[in-house]
Image (cartoon, helix red, strand yellow):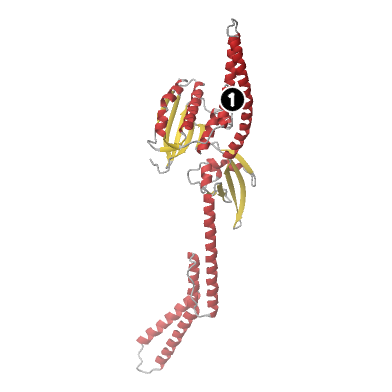
Amino acid sequence: MRIKWLFFIVAAAQLSVWAFMIGKDYDTGYTEFYLLEAATVVNIILLIVLYRQIIRPLNALSDGLNLLKAQDWNTRLRPVGQPEVDRITEVFNMMLEKLKDQRIRFEEQNHFLNILIERAPVGVIITGNDNRVKMVNPAAASLLSLDADVSGKTAAQIAGCRNLLNIPLGETVTFRTENFHTLRCTHLDFIDCGISHDFYIIDDISDSIAAAEKETYGKVIRYISHEVNNTVAGLSSAFDILASYFESADDDMPMLIDACASRAKTLGDFIARYADVVKLSQPERGPVALDYFIDSLGPFLKRMAGTSGSCYEFTAGCGDTEVLLDAAMFERVIINIVKNASESIASVTTKGLIKISTRFKSTGLIELCICDNGAGISDDVRERLFTPFFTNKPDGHGIGLTFISEVLRKHGFRFSLRTDSDGLTRFSIEIPVCQGASH
């Protein structure tokens, strides 16, 4: 900057010489005129030298700094005719070219990694060194039910991510979500530009666990069913023979034989219900107008709710929008849920209400909700819900919820069961709309 000021001073001196020359009277002689002309030539030479040797190189370097500041990697500096400055210009242009290549490679890699993370079937959450979330891919948002943008928040501020805080670095932990999905989460880290970042890999292993559980209890049930059915068949034949033999007897023997035969049949039916869960086939899906389908079940569901003195309501919110499901299977699912709600209400003294409603949770997704004001679900019971054959009923067999979860998983529907702060227990099912359908 001092050199630039020197240039301006010399230019101002030259302007002063010209102004003096214009106002000077040269009648007495031309010596002063020639001296002023010589001074003008010297000033012009100095100006040219200063501009070519100093000002132009400085402007070129200033332009280079502006390019760096603007992150313009495509523009290059031109040589100014000075070997020293031209070498700097050449190095600067080479540096810009390398920065451009590195930036392009970085952007390509970053773009590829972003696409890979976005399309990955496993959830990925990346946090910074301040423990704030920097990235959440769609799979993680879906698995943890994160609807809004959570970037910049800490895990403690995000309800679905609080389980991540308890995972030590380098370890893998499994936990259940509110939607009864079992997630396996691994806590790892990496270093980028000298800064450590934590990241979590989340995988939904619900289907794997369900398949392993079904294979295990399926083998047991098939073995028990085989043995019980053979025994019941033999006993039934024996009871038939005994019944015909004691048909004319006057004592209580015929009644005893009928009671034993009835118990044998009950045992056979009991085992058959367990076997039905194991033998559950793949759903045969078809387009179904969900509101009309539930409305058609209304009389039967109303009668079922009436067994506990409950009122039944249905609020339709989807019109004639169709979904793909197996109507026969799904009918049994709704009946089982309403049956459980009615039994829950029967255990309390309040006036019962069972309400079914449908609504569009988002574009292309319907939420079916069945709620009741029954006894509710405690936290310890909720942790064990949908575990194969678990029940908290004195006379329950644990078949209902097992059947419900099996059917919904085969359909690929997400579901949840919880008692909210308002005291209502809600069984929610998310059902995708048929492709091409709209509301």
Q: Is residue 368 above or below residue 199?
A: above
Front in this rendered view, residue 137 or 155: 137
Residue type at mark 1?
Ile
Asked which quadrant contains residue 306, the reply is top left
Q: Where's residue 246, x and y in %?
A: 60, 9
Q: Residue 212's x, y, as percent?
A: 61, 37
Is 372 placed above or below 82 here?
Answer: above
Q: Of 170 and 153, which appears nearest the observer?
A: 170
Give me the residue at 61% from left, 32% from top: 218
Side of 296 where 241 appears, left or right: right
- Give the labeled residue for mark 1: 271
Question: Could you say where residue 398 lies in the image, as x and y percent from the top left?
Answer: 57, 27
Circle 1 sits in a helix, a strand or a loop, which is it? helix
Residue 74: horizontal and vertical position, in percent? 48, 68
- Residue 398 visible in the picture: no
Q: Residue at x 58, y 13 (%)?
A: 258
Query: At 59% across and 12% down in the image, what residue appears?
Result: 243
Quadrant in the picture for residue 8 = bottom left
Q: Residue furthest bottom?
A: 29
